[in-house]
Amino acid sequence: MPEHLKAPEQSVGDEPPPSQGVHQVSKPVVHSDVASEVLSAAGIDLSTDDPDLPCLTLRMWTIGIFFTLLGCGLNTLYTLRFPSISLTQSAVQFLAFPMGKAWEMTIPDWTIPIVGWKLNPGRFNKKENILIYIMANLSFLTRLSADVLTEQRIFFGYKTGWGFEMLITLATILFGFSIAGICKTIVVDPPAMAYPGVFANTALNSALHGGKEQGESKNVWRTSRYTFFVMAFAASFCWYWFPDFIFPALGYFTFLCWAAPKNTVVNQLFGMKNGLGLLPITFDWSQIAYIGSPLVVPTWAIANVFAALIVWVYIVSPALYYTNTWNSAYLPIQSNSVFDNTGHTYNVSRIINKQDGYRINLVKYADYSTIYLPVTYALNQFGLAFATVLSLFVWVVLEERDQVLHGLRSGWRSIRMTLDQSPKYPERGQPIAYPSTPTWWYWITAIISIALAIFCCEYWKVQLPWYGVLLAFAISTVFFVPLCIIYGTTNLRINIDIFCRIIAGYIWEGRVLANVWFFNLGYISGIKALQFSQDFKLGYYCGIPPRDLFTVQLAALCIATLAQVGVLNWALTHIKNVCAADAPNGFTCPFSRTHFNTSTIWGAVGPRRFFSPDATYHSLLYFFILGLVLPVLVYLLKRRYPTSFWRHVHVPLLLGGLNYLPPASGTNYGSWAVVGLVFGVYIKRRHAAWWQRHTFVLSAALDSSVAIAAVIIFFAVFWTNVANNFSWWGTDVYQETCDWKACPYKTVAKGHTF
């Protein structure tokens, strides 16, 4: 575990008595000084928790349901469109504040008869604000499911109706909710599981609701957090109009490519769209924060990802590419598309079609082409993904076994004492103790989700048998703990989507729908579980009673499921030519189309052909050896040199930290790392008081302002076609380069193959 997030060692006598129905998480005072400083900067102070603040108010439910419906509607609808937009979580948290204050000032203080609810419970408080944010969070968990449902209904032409769509979506989200709750003692309760991704939210909540100010100093800018947030929000909102509409070249600031637009090598090395991004400069926060805000990620984690970028993207990838390994020089150096042996995008319909039941036609496959991948795609999404999968378990056994075993013991103790009705035991240093959520509640929801998934797959005949459902959920569960340990300490996600695709491809070769739903249940449920775990920690930081949080999350996931399925069915029924290449207003379903191509490749072509001993990409399987050996080697070096830089090396991040590349580029990762290191090293050391007081608030201001500006610009400019009449050098220069056109290093003569 990273040193700056570890709790100091305690003697056996220091251990508090066993939990007796209490939400068990150690108070931040047991953290190291560095971690305590970070929590203070994030506006987290559990000693000031007020148990009398109302949580489940009519105001909270009304505003929370409104944003859940709005988020589901907007995000589901625009997942079908390119370019897509979304209403982000930070934007919801900010927008909920003026709505809550308006309710506070205008709604009369009446009491509803019978139920006894007050229309106006008084001042709009921080707990209500956070619960609204957590409710709206569910609208983002449904988006991946919408892509998969669209893929099955439109691209595969298999209509199952509302019943299947609602139940399978509910089962997927509910299972993620369940395993997150069951594993709380391992992935939420330990102090080291800080979940830095919520620091911007807690800092914003502190700023909006008048939390304790940090960082008082003679040398610090004495502006309050709230004032600073407003100024940063306004400045960022205004600025975003330039890279998003007025001067897009500021976002794609590849000036070397502009100077040599036809030089293939220059564009491949320094390009941003289809290049490696060796000079990662961009003035667009949405590009910098493509994988998340760098201001909330620990410096050691950023350094590991930056090292991975240098090694795998800036050194290994060009070495493989320019030596034409895997025939990659005939393809773009960076792309998330797959290609044929002429260098063109692979036409899946030539080997697979609906009339053949989406089974591969081997004769057509032999006459056409095998599948070829750009070098960064092959390296990051396959080779390094294989290494990461194995390294996760080796790493957990070697470096995280104590935390896992302690969590398992705590979980078992909690289960044994679930029915104990003795008085609540307050945490050491924490004055308030709330009744915990019994673990058996999550076991019940897990059983319900598994039963729903099996029923859906068997009743609607989607090619995935009941034991496939169990295997998918088992994979999701097994991977959840190591993935969540990484996410909870770094705010970085390691993806296992390709692993799920390949497993399904081996077991159910030729069954594309089985591949679709194995991916959904095995991968998407785990992604949702990570978000639920983060929300559990956010609830703890903000003093939300665990049982209130359980109620809100369970209600929200049901509401979000209904809203998503309803909006999706409306869109697929009422939008003319939806998902067609010439669909109006850009409703071409790009994400579902990508899922479709992936499912047909791994479900029909299958990994057996792709990685056979005589196949082009068979050598990628050797990365499994790297994933086995590297964690052991680094662990031994840490033991041998405990005070050297090796103690900061994180093998899963070195291997899997670039999992969004492609479609993310070296510019996205490089600019993210540079900004993160500037704030985490230079500003934190040279201007510590300013960093402590404003960094996380700045992150929230940038995220929320860009999200809101993007929605406004889209509807005001792009939706109304105003942008069609606006063109100048700053809107076109970056599109006239080889980087934008994806030029390959080598070309294939017309009528020939490589």
Image (cartoon, rainbow, N blue to C red):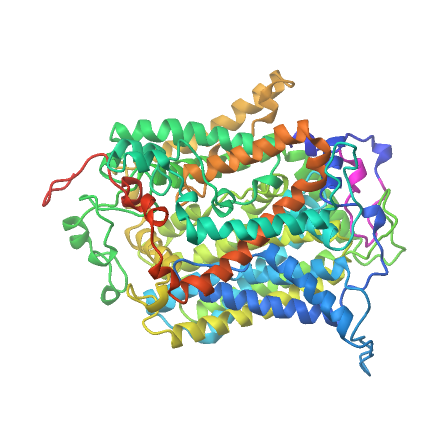
In this view, which residue lies farthest toward the right? 423
Write down the quadrant of residue 458 in the picture. bottom left
Task: Say whether residue 183 is visible.
Answer: no
- Residue at 72% across / 45% down in the picture? 189
568 sits left or right of 505 in the view = right
Q: Quadrant of the C terminus?
A: top left
Start-end of magenta stretch? 16-31
In this view, which residue lies farthest toward the top? 640
75 sits left or right of 613 in the view = right
Q: x and y percent of residue 532 in the render?
A: 62, 54
Q: From this view, report whether residue 646 is shown above or below residue 724.
A: above
Q: Main secondary structure of the magenta part?
A: loop
Using the image as rendered, state which of residue 536 and residue 81 is in the foreground: 81
Q: x and y percent of residue 20 in the render?
A: 83, 52
- Residue at 60% across / 65% down in the picture? 557
Using the image as rendered, state which of residue 518 and residue 195 is in the foreground: 195
Q: From this view, report whether residue 317 is shown above or below residue 517.
A: above
Q: Quadrant of the N terminus?
A: top right
In this view, which residue lies farthest toward the left? 751
**Would you say residue 6 sits in the magenta stretch?**
no
**Would you say residue 18 sits in the magenta stretch?**
yes
Write down the quadrant of residue 490 in the picture. top right
Using the image as rendered, state which of residue 385 and residue 284 is in the foreground: 284
Using the image as rendered, state which of residue 10 and residue 302 is in the foreground: 302
- Residue at 52% across / 62% down in the picture? 142
Q: From this view, report whether residue 411 is shown above or below residue 580.
A: above
Q: x and y percent of residue 414 in the render?
A: 76, 50
Q: x and y percent of residue 13 in the render?
A: 87, 33
Task: Say whether residue 364 is visible.
Answer: yes
